[in-house]
Image (cartoon, rainbow, N blue to C red):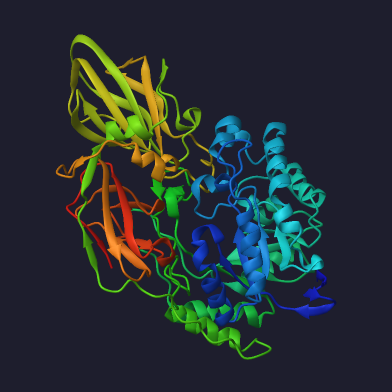
Amino acid sequence: MAEFGVGETDFLLDGRPVRLLSGALHYFRVHEGQWDHRLAMLRAMGLNCVETYVPWNLHEPARGEYTDVEALGRFLDAAQKAGLWAIVRPGPYICAEWENGGLPMWLTGLVGRRVRTDDAEYLAAVDGWFTTLLPQVVERQIDRGGPVIMVQAENEYGSYGSDHGYLRHVADVLRDCGVSVPLFTSDGPEDHMLTGGSLPDVLATVNFGSGAMDAFAALRRHRPTGPLMCMEFWCGWFAHWGDECVTRDAAQAAKELREILELGGSVNLYMAHGGTNFAGWAGANRAGTLHDGLLEPTVTSYDYDAPIDESGRPTAKFWAFREVFAEYAEEPLPEVPPAPPLLGTGLDVRPADWSPLDAVLDAVGDPETMTPTPPTFEELGVDRGLVRYRVRVPGPRRPYPLRASGLRDRAVVYVDGVRTGVLSEDHETLPDLVPGPAEVDFWVESQGRVNYGPRLGEPKGITGGVLHERQYLHGVRARGLRLASFTPEAVESVSFLPAESGGPGLYRASVEIEAPGDARVELPGWTRGFLWVNGFCLGRYWWVGPQQGLFLPGSVLRQGTNDIWVLELEEAGAGITLR
């Protein structure tokens, strides 16, 4: 048992000043079989603490239906075993480049712009979530013999809103649920953010990637006393599909880190180890300084140019940071643990079976609904995956433009069974005119819900309507194909044919492995879709890059036969390579 507190100038452990050297490592972005190794890597870098968000939507995919909330508790136990304290950031909103900023789509679909405010309907959902989650935290607090030393109230709220009644409610619920360790907020080091996102009786921290002196000075204008802490030291960055990877020089990042520590501050590296956005959980941003431009989906890899890379190996940044942290360590740093084993030589696999999308939808998809206008993904209960919208163009009539108004995010369109075009939110109209009568299918894919900014919680699908010329086409049949529905039992019900087609659909292959190990899966010639190994979804692939392969944790593989499924949405390649 110990007591962790906030003093006038320092964090205090049983009354003794301590400095927090923390690193972000999200349990939900690392396969559980590799938690121990990644936590040991944090210790070896010189850290004494680990920080994690908690994604609400991962654990409550449907209202009142909870899945493996205990995962947080298991991770905190692993952190304590590794000799680390823990900082927990349970939201309810987390950003984190995660789908919908961690908020469940069923909730944002229900309350809309009332999200993250002092709204009774929204707060009732928050209270239910915290009541379910927080026992995992409360029983592992440091004053009960556990590793948890601090808990965050909301997340960067000053970048979004100014409803202090809401922020107060979040802090009060945390306390009411038994959180006794210090609470904190974190915001950018700007006056309007610190004003909107902080509470007078809760520790305020700041997030930045450089300029520690100016950032801490901004914090001191609002908080004359209390420990200085950079809760997110951005030592790298994330990437969007179609953009270049973002990197940061190791020596320059180490220089900025050293400045934080020389000023007497504590620090949390964001990210120490980024991991992977498995299972299509990557979020998206809106372009522009006001975050209201075109959608920019985040890639599957969350490597983040972190000191520990996506596969858990040390980078030049790791060694540079370790040198800095060693100067502040009370004892010699632990040895760097050996890297996990690699798969070894490359394995080339050719799919044996294929099933067209319509057949996959019939076997695995949700029941069809019939509505006058296109239902959104939220109305259909689809968080990640596809929706097929089917609408009939009456006839006879002359050819006119056909448009999917308010499309979010991407659609492959078939007219009378023939592929006619690919639409996106900035190209909503088919290039060729469509006469009537005709039957049109829009296979619409959500490419990640916005996780930051004023467009948070916006719906997915055809959100406006289908128009032929200026006339709305009514009577829409819609079916959801959810990624979560792809289980081994469900895939067994799919009718497969020999894999001779290169068209869209579900491809199935198997590969024999003698000694499992970490690998990368490459799909040369494939276009866009999702991949599973032994029923575990590695995430989205897309030829536009910059990501050209998917990380495959060795703990997913098994000795002997391993199953591979690829859901290709446009045009398939000939083979799959494991390296």
Task: Return the x and y of residue 565 as percentages of the image width and height.
Answer: 31, 49
Residue drawn at point x = 58 percent, y = 86 percent: 334
**Left or right placement of residue 560 versus residue 266 in this view:** left
Residue drawn at point x = 19 percent, y = 10 percent: 397
Residue drawn at point x = 19 percent, y = 21 percent: 434
The reply to whether residue 486 is in sight is no
Residue drawn at point x = 73 percent, y = 63 percent: 150
Report the residue that reaches farthest toward the left: 500
Residue 552 location, quadrant: bottom left
Q: Quadrant of the C terminus?
A: bottom left
Task: Return the x and y of residue 233 as percentages of the image width and height.
Answer: 57, 69
- The residue closer to the viewer here, 339 or 172, is 339
Q: Quadrant of the N terminus?
A: bottom right
Task: Return the x and y of residue 500 as percentages of the image width and height.
Answer: 14, 44
Report the residue that reaches farthest toward the front: 560
**Left or right placement of residue 491 versus residue 93 in this view:** left
